Image: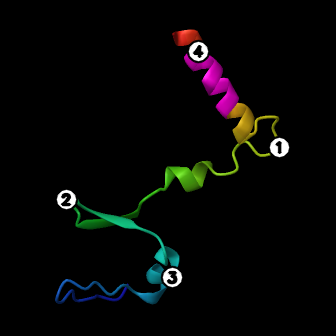
């Protein structure tokens, strides 16, 4: 892998890695071996569509939550 030099707070990544990370948020972790660049998982985006094809709709979910609140009172 090519070496890179970090200057002025700007990080240039090799094209292959930059293309994989394009548009993603990343976190940097310092490890014994060096610096780890890890994409941040967006749990909302990851969960999107998980209930697709089920009988649960956002409206029925809201009604269910309202009933739960009434039962708590």
**For discs 3 and 4, the disc positioned in front in the rendered view:** 4
Give the Cα distance between marks 2 and 3. Answer: 26 Å
Q: Residues within 10 Å of mark 4 (few under 14, many from 20)?
A: few
Q: Residues within 10 Å of mark 1 (few under 14, many from 20)?
A: few
Identify the main secondary structure in magenta.
helix
Q: Residue at x 19, y 83 (%)?
A: 9
Q: Residue at x 34, y 89 (%)?
A: 2
| Residue 27 in the image, given as x and y percentages of width and height | 32, 63
Is residue 63 shown in magenta?
A: yes
**Label 4–label 2 contact, CB within 8 A:** no
| Residue 39 in the image, given as x and y percentages of width and height | 42, 64
Q: Which residue is the site of mark 4?
A: 70
Precedes in sequence: disc 4 or disc 2: 2
**For discs 2 and 3, the disc positioned in front in the rendered view:** 3
Q: Quadrant of residue 10?
A: bottom left
Is residue 9 shown in magenta?
A: no
**For discs 4 and 2, the disc positioned in front in the rendered view:** 4
Q: Which residue is the site of mark 3?
A: 19
Q: Secondary structure at mark 3?
A: helix
Q: Secondary structure at mark 1?
A: loop
Q: Residue furthest left?
A: 8
Q: Residues within 10 Å of mark 3 (few under 14, many from 20)?
A: few
Q: Which residue is the site of mark 2?
A: 32
Give the Cα distance between marks 1 and 4. Answer: 28 Å
The residues colored magenta run 62-69
Q: Residue at x 59, y 10 (%)?
A: 71
Precedes in sequence: disc 1 or disc 2: 2
Compared with 26, 15 (above or below) is: below
Precedes in sequence: disc 2 or disc 3: 3
């Amino acid at each position: 892998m090519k070496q890179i030099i970090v200057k002025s707070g700007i990080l240039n990544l090799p094209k292959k890695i930059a293309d994989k990370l394009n548009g993603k948020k990343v976190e940097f972790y310092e490890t014994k071996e060096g610096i780890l660049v890890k994409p941040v998982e967006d749990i909302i985006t990851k969960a999107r569509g998980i209930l697709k094809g089920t009988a649960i709709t956002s409206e029925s979910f809201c009604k269910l939550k309202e009933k739960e609140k009434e039962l708590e009172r």
